[in-house]
Image (spheres, rainbow, N blue to C red):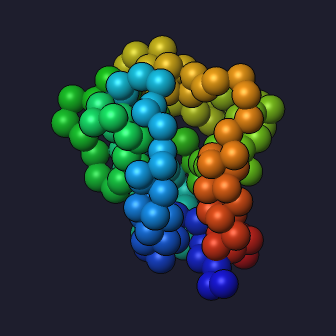
């Protein structure tokens, strides 16, 4: 399997393909949320990466570009984004937040609502994260 650097153009394309493959099986998100994300300090890209997460259409869409009138904008560095999306490290995320590496502008309760999940394990989510990690290269 070809591996791509996290947040490179090739990685983003592979993540889109992965989401499309599982779109019909994905459960409805726990809450409608519109948030923008800015990822800074990406060594293999020029400038910051601007993206968004939108669950208002009944599925979680993660895409490049910003939404008009988001409910929340989150700014974080590359290493922290990797903790969130690849490593899925809640303790590391809490440490990053307490260290001031995550900035939020807007209604932070929207992020908590998006993260609400049923207490039982979700095999589909685990399969998707396993595949996501499989095509994500280690940082150089």
- Observer able to see residue 7: yes
Viewer-nearest residue: 50 or 124: 124
Q: Is residue 24 left or right of residue 117?
A: left
Residue at image point 38% right, 40% down: 59
Residue at the bottom extreme, as displayed = 2
Residue 41 x, y percent position in the rendering: 55, 57
Up-down: is 105 above or below 5? Answer: above
Residue at the left extreme, as displayed = 68
Up-down: is 68 above or below 42? Answer: above
Viewer-nearest residue: 43 or 82: 82
Viewer-nearest residue: 98 or 119: 119
Residue 16 quadrant: bottom left
Residue 36 x, y percent position in the rendering: 36, 38
Quadrant including the C terminus: bottom right
Residue at image point 27% right, 36% down: 57
Residue 68 x, y percent position in the rendering: 19, 36
Residue at image point 40% right, 16% down: 107
Viewer-nearest residue: 136 or 42: 136
Q: Is residue 91 left or right of residue 6?
A: right
Residue at the front extreme, as displayed = 25
Residue 66 quadrant: top left
- Observer able to see residue 48: no
Quadrant including the N terminus: bottom right
């Amino acid at each position: 399997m070809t591996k791509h650097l996290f947040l490179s153009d090739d990685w983003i394309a592979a993540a889109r393909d992965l989401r499309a493959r599982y779109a019909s099986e994905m459960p409805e998100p726990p809450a409608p949320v519109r948030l923008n994300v800015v990822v800074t300090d990406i060594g293999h890209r020029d400038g910051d990466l601007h993206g968004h997460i939108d669950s208002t259409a009944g599925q979680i869409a993660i895409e490049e570009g910003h939404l008009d009138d988001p409910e929340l904008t989150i700014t974080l560095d590359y290493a922290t984004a990797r903790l969130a999306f690849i490593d899925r490290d809640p303790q590391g995320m809490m440490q990053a937040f307490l260290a001031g590496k995550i900035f939020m502008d807007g209604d932070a309760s929207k992020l908590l609502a998006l993260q609400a999940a049923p207490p039982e394990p979700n095999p589909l989510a685990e399969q998707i994260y396993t595949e996501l990690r499989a095509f994500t290269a280690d940082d150089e």
